[in-house]
Image: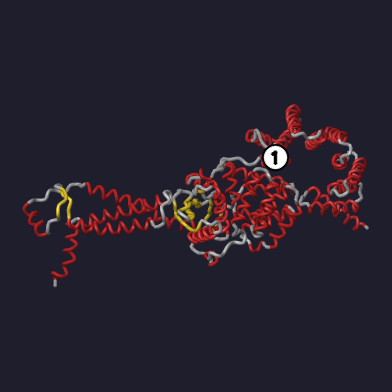
């Protein structure tokens, strides 16, 4: 009975004597290293999905063979020999005293293999803990990079942005995540000059992610394997650039099938990051309202964006209209079309499209809903409502300099200059952290706010930076900068420096073939801004003399004479002539109303101010000065009635 119970221990001792245990440990360590290396090179080498399975089966077979061979044979100083029976081995040990055991080559090899295994296993053991740390106490902040087209087919470049944008939209719908939005990512990428997405390596993607202040980032590629398309994605820790999880989705190369691939990939990433997901997010048929299921709609949308980047806004509108004809629920395309129309004064179309989206906003993602609220406020309401919507957008993505800039512009329109400065400087700080620079308009608007608050030293420093950052640029913006610099120098009595800027300003206008009357108007505005009224009036009169039949020039001189109260009567005569030539121009009603108000005719002034305001808001052009005049007229009329 005792002998039988001792058999397992004898067998174990025999395994050790024949070095089977040592060999198996070394083999398993080697096998693990081989499997890990295979998984690492599988994607870059384009190996099929079954490669890992095949290697695993071969290694399993090899384990059995290795165990059998190590039982039968032994490696000795004299070469490979058949292992001696236990009894014979013990007799030889009694005769020959065993020398002190020396360090063997096999010991070194096993030690190296064990170290390699520890290096490979350690991140996997603690990777989950890292993600749990990211989840604990706060939302995980995610940045999504463009996917690289590695198919060799440039027609599939469209999917580089599509997959990125779709992932952003899907992930934004999860309240547990804070996702850097498309505009933030695209602005950063463009500011770095990364036009070719093939140059966005994992290390560069990591730098971009850090600039976006994200906890993790998603990077990936698109490949073709035979007749199938494969989308690979990886989630990286932004701090360590360590891969936390890899995903691979494969499907048919048909364009419409990639939509299903994106949905499946989004659900898997979502589930991994938050460990909870609604049923609809796992449903292959579910798509967020803000996206499209049509590859053709995507193609037209990308064509519209590309046309806009080259400044061809007419073609951009054409493709934008084709996009929403294919899929009227494609929000990103509709929003971009609204904005193009608004920027080019096609207000009727912009408002029609906006009203449709606004009525359906409850079905959208939280980001799209906030964005539509802002666009609606921009087109139909006042900067106050715009500010509220923009603050909602910042709650979703606080690393978008464009949102801070729009906030600054909204405060600027309300003449709340200190608040405007605060928002513009936040935008500038983000660009500084990105080691890039904003558009030149930032300098114009921020400079205006500095000027209005008397911060001339900061204003001058800003303009010098603008000269350095934009030695060549948009001539119209350059002219605004030159005019602002001239106003600054004139305001401080530095006539010589001001004249130098004025000469450059005139030269730039002449290069664009502006009329002499328009050049005179620009100079009049410059001197008026610097409160040098005699020179301003001189140039306004010269402009009207150069274009005597222009109702625009009549209105400009009339407004100057009325607003400065230099000659209200002459101003009223001029605005009457301007209205005869252009009876429907809403800003002319404001000029005449201002004249009537200063003449004490409050009721007549109020009627004109109200008429101007209705027409102005129909054209989505809020003007705070005109709003204040309207409110002042209402108050004056009310006071008159109370006195009666």
Q: Is residue 419 visible?
A: no
| Residue 366 drawn at (x, y percent) | 62, 59
Frontmost residue, 34 versus 608: 34
Where the C terminus falls, by quadrant? bottom right
Instruction: Determine the residue located farthest toward the left in the rendered image.
Output: 95
Residue in view at x 78 percent, y 49 percent: 623
- SS type, badge 1: helix
Q: Give the tally of numbered discs.
A: 1
Residue of label 1: 444
Check the image and tell me how it is coloured. Answer: secondary structure
Residue 76 left/right relative to 303? left
Q: Is residue 12 above or below residue 442?
A: below
Is 175 located above or below residue 474 in the figure? below
Q: Can residue 266 be seen here?
A: yes
Q: Nearer the viewer, residue 518 or 609?
A: 518
Q: Is residue 431 left or right of residue 387?
A: left
Q: Nearer the viewer, residue 600 or 413?
A: 413
In the rendered image of this protein, does residue 54 appear above or below residue 414? below
| Image location of residue 573, percent across then percent down | 93, 42
Kindly give the residue lying farthest to the top in the view shown: 496
556 lies above or below 626: above
- Rendering coords of residue 587 (x, y %): 83, 47
Q: Residue furthest front?
A: 227
Q: Position of residue 610 (x, y in %)?
A: 85, 54
């Amino acid at each position: 009975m005792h002998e039988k119970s001792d058999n397992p221990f004898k067998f174990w001792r025999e395994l050790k004597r024949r070095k089977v245990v040592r060999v198996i440990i070394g083999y398993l360590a080697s096998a693990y290293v081989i499997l890990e290396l295979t998984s690492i090179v599988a994607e870059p080498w384009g190996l099929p999905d079954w490669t890992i399975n095949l290697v695993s089966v071969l290694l399993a077979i090899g384990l059995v063979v290795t165990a059998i061979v190590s039982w039968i044979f032994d490696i000795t100083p004299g070469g490979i020999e058949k292992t001696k029976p236990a009894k014979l081995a013990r007799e030889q040990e009694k005769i020959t005293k065993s020398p002190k055991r020396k360090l063997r080559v096999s010991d070194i090899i096993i030690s190296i293999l064990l170290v390699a295994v520890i290096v490979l296993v350690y991140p996997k053991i603690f990777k989950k803990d890292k993600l749990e740390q990211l989840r604990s106490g706060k939302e995980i902040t995610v940045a999504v990079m463009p996917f690289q087209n590695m198919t060799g087919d440039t027609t599939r470049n469209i999917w580089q942005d599509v997959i990125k944008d779709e992932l952003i939209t899907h992930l934004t719908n999860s309240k547990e995540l804070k996702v850097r939005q498309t505009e933030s990512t695209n602005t950063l990428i463009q500011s770095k000059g990364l036009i070719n997405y093939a140059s966005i390596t994992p290390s560069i993607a990591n730098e971009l992610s850090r600039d976006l202040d994200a906890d993790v980032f998603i990077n990936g590629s698109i490949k073709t394997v035979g007749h199938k398309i494969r989308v690979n994605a990886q989630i990286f820790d932004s701090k360590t650039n360590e891969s936390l999880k890899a995903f691979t989705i494969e499907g048919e190369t048909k364009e419409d099938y990639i939509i299903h691939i994106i949905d499946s990939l989004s659900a898997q990433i979502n589930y991994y990051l938050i460990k909870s997901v609604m049923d609809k997010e796992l449903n292959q048929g579910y798509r967020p309202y803000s996206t499209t299921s049509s590859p053709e709609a995507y193609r037209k949308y990308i064509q519209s964006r590309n046309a806009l980047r080259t400044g061809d806004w007419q073609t951009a509108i054409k493709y934008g209209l084709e996009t929403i004809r294919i899929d009227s629920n494609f929000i990103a395309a509709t929003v971009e079309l609204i904005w193009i129309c608004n920027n080019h004064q096609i207000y009727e179309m912009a408002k029609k499209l906006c009203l449709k989206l606004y009525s359906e906003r409850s079905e959208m993602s939280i980001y799209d809903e906030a964005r539509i609220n802002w666009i609606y406020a921009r087109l139909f309401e006042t900067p106050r409502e715009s500010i509220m919507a923009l603050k909602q957008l910042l709650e979703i993505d606080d690393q978008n300099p464009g949102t801070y800039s729009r906030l600054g512009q909204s405060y600027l329109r309300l003449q709340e200059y200190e608040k405007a400065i605060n928002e513009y400087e936040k935008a500038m700080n983000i660009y500084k952290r990105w080691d890039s620079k904003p558009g030149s308009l930032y300098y114009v608007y921020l400079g205006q706010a500095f000027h209005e608050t008397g911060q001339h030293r900061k204003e001058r420093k800003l303009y010098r930076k603008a000269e350095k950052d934009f030695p060549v640029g948009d001539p119209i913006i350059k002219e605004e900068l030159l005019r602002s610099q001239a106003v600054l120098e004139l305001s401080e009595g530095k006539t010589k420096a001001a004249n130098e800027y004025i000469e450059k300003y005139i030269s730039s206008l002449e290069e664009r073939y502006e009329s002499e009357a328009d050049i005179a108007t620009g100079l009049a505005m410059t001197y008026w801004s610097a409160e040098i009224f005699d020179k301003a009036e001189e140039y306004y009169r010269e402009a009207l003399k150069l274009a005597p039949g222009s109702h625009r020039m009549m209105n400009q001189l009339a407004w100057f004479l009325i607003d400065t109260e230099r000659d209200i009567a002459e101003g009223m005569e001029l605005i009457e002539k301007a209205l005869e030539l252009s009876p429907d121009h809403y800003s002319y009603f404001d000029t005449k109303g201002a004249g009537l108000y200063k003449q004490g005719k409050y009721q007549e002034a109020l009627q004109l101010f109200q008429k101007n305001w209705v027409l102005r808001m129909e054209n989505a052009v809020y003007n705070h000065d005109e709003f204040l005049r309207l409110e002042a007229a209402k108050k004056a009329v009310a006071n008159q009635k109370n006195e009666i």
